[in-house]
Image (cartoon, rainbow, N blue to C red):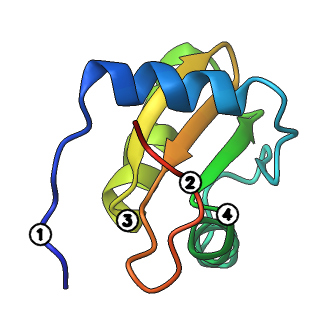
Amino acid sequence: MESFVPLSNPQIRHLRGLAHSLKPVVMVGQHGLRDSVLEEINIALDFHELVKIKVSAGDRDERDKIIQQITNSTRAELIQRIGNMAVLFRRNPKKPKVVLP
C-alpha cells in the first residue's frame, strides 16, 4: 500500500483541466450507492485514474454524503464537484497514466 501524498494546488488545477472534457463513467442513481456501483468506480479509477461520476440522487446534502462515501471507500481524492458531477483521482501505482506537474 502506498502512502497517501496530498495533491498540490497546481496539480489539482491541472487535473480539473484534464477532467473538463471527460464524460461520466459511472452514474449513481435513485437507488443510491450499492456495492456494485462502488466496484465499478474502483475499476474505473484503476484504469483511468481520473474519473467523472454523475450522482443523480436526492438533494445536495444527500449527494454530498454519497460523494463522501465514495471517496472514503475508494481512497480517491475529490478534485472537483459541480452540481451532480464529481471528479475523482486516485493514482495507480503499477500503471500511472496521468502525468502530474
**Of 9 and 86, which appears nearest the observer?**
9
* Residue occupying the point 88% across, 39% down: 23
Q: Around disc 2, counting alpha carbons within 10 Å, would you say few (fewer than 14), some (14 to 19), or many (20 or more)? A: some
For discs 3 and 4, the disc positioned in front in the rendered view: 4
Proximity of marks 4 and 2: CB atoms separated by less than 8 Å: no
Of callouts 3 and 4, which one flags the residue occurring earlier in the amino acid sequence? 4
* Residue occupying the point 80% across, 46% down: 29
Residue underneath mark 4 = 48
Proximity of marks 3 and 2: CB atoms separated by less than 8 Å: no
Q: Around disc 3, counting alpha carbons within 10 Å, would you say few (fewer than 14), some (14 to 19), or many (20 or more)? A: few
Q: Is residue 35 left or right of residue 74?
A: right
Residue underneath mark 1 = 3
Q: Amino acid at mark 3?
A: Ser
Residue underneath mark 3 = 73
Q: Amino acid at mark 4?
A: His
Q: Secondary structure at mark 3?
A: helix
| Residue 51 visible in the shown view | yes
